[in-house]
Amino acid sequence: MTAVQRRGGLLRFVPPFTLALFLGPLFAGLLWTLGPAFGYLPALGGERLSLAPWQALFAYPGLGNAVGLSLGTGLTATLLSVAIVTALFAHWHDSRLIARLRRLIAPLLSVPHAALAFGLAFLIAPSGWLFRLFWAPLAGPVPPDLTIVQDPLGLALIGGLVLKEVPFLFLIMLAASGQTATAGQVAQARGFGYGKARAWCAVAFPQLYPQLRLPVFAVLTYAMSTVDMAIILGPATPPPLAVLLVRWFNDPDLAFRFQASAGAILQLLLVAGTVLLWLGAERVIVRAARRRLMAGRRGGTGRFGAMLSAGTAITVFGTATAGLATMALWAGAGRWRYPDPLPSDWSLDAAVRHGPALGGHVATTAGIAIAAAGAALVLALASLEAGQRRTTANANGGRGLVLLYLPLLVPQVAFLFGIQILLVQAGADGTWPAVAWSHLLFVLPYVFLALGGAYRDLDPRYFRTGLALGRSPAALFWRLRLPLLLRPILVAGAIGIAVSVGEYLPTLFAGAGRVTTVTTEAVGLAAGGDRRLIGLYAVVQMILPGLAFLAALIIPAWCFRRRRGMRTAA
Amino acid sequence: MTCNTRIMATLSALVLLLAAMAAIVPGRTAAASSTPVEDWQALTERAKGQTVYWNAWGGDTVINAYIDWVAARVKEQFDVTVEHVKLTDTGSAVARVVAEKAAGRSAGGSIDLIWINGENFAAMKRNGLLYGPFAEMLPNFRYVDVAEKPSTILDFTVPTDGFESPWGMAHFIFMYDRDVLASPPKSAVRLLDWARTHPGRFTYPQPPDFVGTSFLKQALLELATDRDRLLRPVGDDFEATTAPLWAYLDELRPHLWRGGKNYPESSTRLRRMLDDREVDIAMAFNPATASNDIANGLLPKSTRTFIFDAGTLSNSHFVAIPFNASAREGAMVVANFLISPEAQLHKQDPAVWGDFTVLDVAALPVEERARFRHLKLGPATLTPEELTPSLPEPHPSWVGALEAEWQRRYGH
């Protein structure tokens, strides 16, 4: 044991504490799903274990299609998102295109899935904006009877998922490539005559992919178990499995909860199976790719690929932005009926009428988001620092921390009911700290994800120098590491705030309906289908995390305004 | 490495502990207690200062505004605070009560009042999740028109037994734009003929959305050979009783919007589709919906409503108190206020909500009676006389059975 390690003190207990805070409730939550899945839920008269819920589940008409849809849309959307981001970086990693797209990313990251889905649906539906602009002038006041959204194959749903996940993976890829010293290696490979894309794929991608893997699995889980996007964009005869589950959990016939619990376990197995499948496919691809790489083919200029990848990425970012723009238009619309290309009159009625209530919800939302993101930052920093001090070689905070990502990898419906029961038993439901804690489950993994790489890849020589100069690790943490990492810390905090603001189900379950955030209110009002209100709330939902992202840009710039070297530090 | 094992050990210990905790949680069967309300005056005293969390569907701005008004009045008159918890689905509130019961919380629950009716009420009552009976002890209950409006005590044929207190009357109505559709089809059979000549211009919300299921019931009430059979619970004759409905829907389906392969997920979505000219007919379970939407700029001014000539499905909607409500007295004060002439009058005002009263207007004091008589209807709302004959709701067991069969036939 080194002196450094002993001085670690209380920090040592942070990673296990963090894990216990997280996984205990998660597993307990799962148990409360597992019980009813086998017929055990005494509150509803289920006293004995049985397989009846499973029989009911498999007898449900259309279950096969629902499962197929979940698999198909989830897997396709994930593969497409990964492919789009990878191709973009392969061809444009050293260009200004990446920097330009980066500027668009904050609003796209901060907007909740449902708002983006509404935007996309209104953009492409037969009575939507594009048809109002281009079809109505030719064809008159009646929209065509076409199936565009809610198509039976789930293409619109896949599109919506891609719009939301590409910016996320883009950010992860950007962070990863900032940390690994791949730029020089790619340049070297190009010196050997490899084409741009091939050099990047051969040299950089294998080093970046490990950092991408967990986020990809989070995307996969989300895509396979999304409810809010699927209701708006997905087919409904039948809907994907997750939508069926929520419907069953809310069915007036309480006997449906047993079948719903069995379905939640099925959903969990489905996701786990797909992740395993993905890992298997990775191996196959690695083996095949290795042979091709060894062959040493240099690849061409890849102009076609470059155009295609840039085109796709710009389409994705452009469509998402246009969808959000329609939401902003609706927020200020008075009356906007098909086939009018723009609202026929404008009104701030919605904003005025809902302004007072909105103010309170904004305060609650911001308070919870800041608490959750703040706690996540403290826990993540302490865990990372503990890992860092234990040994500089194995600096990822203990591999056990990988388990932190479990809340992202387990479908929410599978454990939220159980968490609700735990909170009720603890008498803590319906309070805002309970809500903040339930958000922490989802905020911490993202914060950890955003911060971990930057933390690990900070040049260790700074600290050796510091230690050699006689400073304690604690002093070095406060005076060296925090300032050096100010920007990634603030960006991670902003991501945490964005995640917290967008949470719907956890807020509902932990808040017992007594804690109202902008998002629960938005979803409640969206049931009325008034697009002006939906637009208004979407704008508010974007603004809150948008401010945090803005702060993450401005604060470091101001702090380091006299330090040229810090300005470029990512 | 040692760190990992330690983490794993801590974890497994924790999981075991939690598993044990989960296993010993008693599944108490807290039967709804029925303490008689001794004295209304004493009860209102105890209600003072309480906060009532009222879980009510929050998808309609008009209704939300009315609930805000109720909150202000109740605060003023009784010092009871009302917080409106806006639901997307009443089922989620039922689910929360189930979770609380599973966790053994038989007092101090998070819901004090639920806006409810039909199968949600039947399920909660059957599972002992409701407090009561209380409705008949509310002083204002004497004004309720139980004789002429039997649905105020028979909710989808299920006796309320005082476990819920009536709030308003609802009728199933269709809406259309009279500038587009000159004479709407006023029966299920004529609707089919109309759909044949106007393919893709009609659809209904996808069951189990309650308006979608109500459309099935509305059609079945017209087509069934023995309508009274529907008032008793579903039995072995489900197939025979409902065969005319499925034959009808099989014929209708190819002529529906999107060829009957997709359905709107709710009646509110369907109303947006009417506004966007995607369809020519929409439906709702509230006769004032069209007028409200016109006032809010959500439907064209030329929107009108109609019902089937054979009569229209009607029911009442209610408020109920969960068995473990924290502010039981406050909830009863609110329930009582909701059936006061003042609250009912305000609710029926078309500029407010336009929801019909559950009270017997003729039995009210002269002044209130006159004010009810002076109320106008919204531009698209039919008069109570035009909304007749009203057809009673089938027994709630038909809801689940119809939804399951619909799912089997058209839902996948």
Image: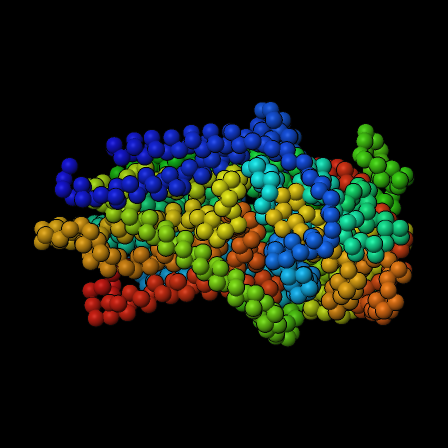
- Visible residue check, residue A376: yes
- Visible residue check, residue B312: no
Picture residue at 65% right of the left edge, 53% below the top: B46
Picture residue at 81% right of the left edge, 56% below the top: B358
Residue B10 picture location, percent across and down: 34, 33
In the foreground, A542 or B388: B388
Q: Is A163 placed above or below B371 here?
A: above
Residue A353 picture location, percent across and down: 61, 70
Q: Is B176 placed above or below B322 here?
A: below
In the foreground, A142 or A371: A371
In the foreground, A446 or A156: A446
In the foreground, A463 or B357: B357
Residue A64 picture location, percent across and down: 60, 34
B294 relative to A93 in the view: left or right: right
In which image quadrant can residue A63 be found? top right
Picture residue at 51% right of the left edge, 54% below the top: A113
